[in-house]
Amino acid sequence: MKLKKAMDRIPGGLMLVPLLLGACVHTFAPGAGKYFGSFTNGLIAGTVPILAVWFFCMGATIDLRATGTVLRKSGTLLVTKMVVAWIATLVASHFIPIDGIKGGLFAGLSVLAITTSMDMTNGGLYAAVMQQYGTKEEAGAFVLMSVESGPLVSMIILGATGVAFFEPRLFVGAVLPFLIGFALGNIDSDLREFFGRCVHPLIPFFGFALGNGIDLNVIAKSGMAGVLLGLAVIVVTGIPLIVADRWIAGGNGAAGLAASSTAGAAVANPAIIGEMIPSFKPLVPAATAMVATACLVTAILVPMLTALWVRRHHARDTLREELLAPTAPPLKESDMHV
């Protein structure tokens, strides 16, 4: 059986399939971890340590020796995404209660879910899309997107908007593994390659552990809200990213649209932040389910929308070239033969 190929056919499947399996375990056998104990319990309840190793390895993959064009493009998309997520959080905090929406179509929606779904781009999806529809430099622009990985950016945004207060030591604790990995990866390219190989294999493990904190009933209840959240991510972050790509990074907007997604790793952020801020813990299951749904929705739609954007742009350029092409001069009488 080709299970890996089957998962790869599902957008974000490497994260979402183990997450759903974990949710099944939590729903139908909630005491399984304590019952088996030892290493089995470690896999079921080990979200934080597994993510710590993954975050360290992600830091090691960032190479500051990238070209100036790549850094300019990557930096533009990174800063724009963070600023838009900050504005969205600020606006949402004025309309959504701190403990989330309790009923209706948007039941379970919280500021925590909005922030964690909007502030982190799916770097793998972006690179794959731009390798097909963009330039080599645009495809390599995911080099700085790893900075968004983990809870640090979400913590900064939630703190800056006054939604939550984090002690300085918590900020240091959240970013320290990433910084150590980043330093080692840039000191020794062999270490970058060595630790970089661990990034993708760790995803199913923390996906499964995350799923063990979710009840399938929560996913069913928050499904439509998660779909709407995914669409909002594309619209709210996509438009500013397209503008920034065109006017600052010098692109045609395709790279900005390709960056308007929710990263699979963002699914972990509500749980991590919930560990730091106890008042957020009741929001974690619904927020995790919504971010996972937003990840799936954006993973399906963003490549299609980017392809349509590129085709439209190329068609427009072709038409402009045809209109501006010099026409053949009229024949003179001396050139005409009867």
Image (cartoon, rainbow, N blue to C red):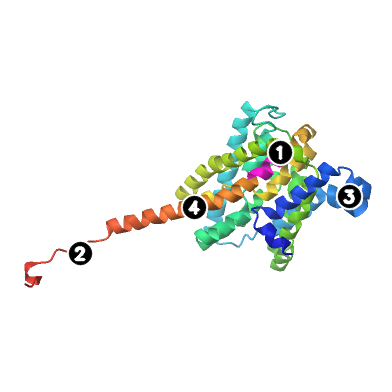
Which numbered disc, 4 or 3, marks the residue that appears first in the sequence?
Answer: 3
Disc 4 to disc 1, C-alpha distance: 34 Å
Mark 4 lies on a secondary structure that is helix
Q: Which residue is mark 3?
A: 41
Which numbered disc, 1 or 2, marks the residue that appears first in the sequence?
Answer: 1
Name the residue rendered at 79%, 46% in the picture.
24
Q: Could you say where residue 298 lies in the image, as x and y percent from the top left?
A: 60, 47
User: For residue 281, which quarter of the picture?
Assistant: top right
Which numbered disc, 4 or 2, marks the residue that appears first in the sequence?
Answer: 4
Q: Which residue is mark 1?
A: 220
Mark 2 lies on a secondary structure that is loop
Which dot, 4 or 1, sits closer to the camera?
1
What is the crowding at mark 2: few (fewer than 14 residues within 10 Å), some, or many (at least 20)? few
Residue stretch in magenta: 287-294
Under mark 1, the amino acid is Ala
Q: Which residue is mark 4?
A: 254
Q: Could you say where residue 219 lies in the image, as x and y percent from the top left?
A: 72, 40
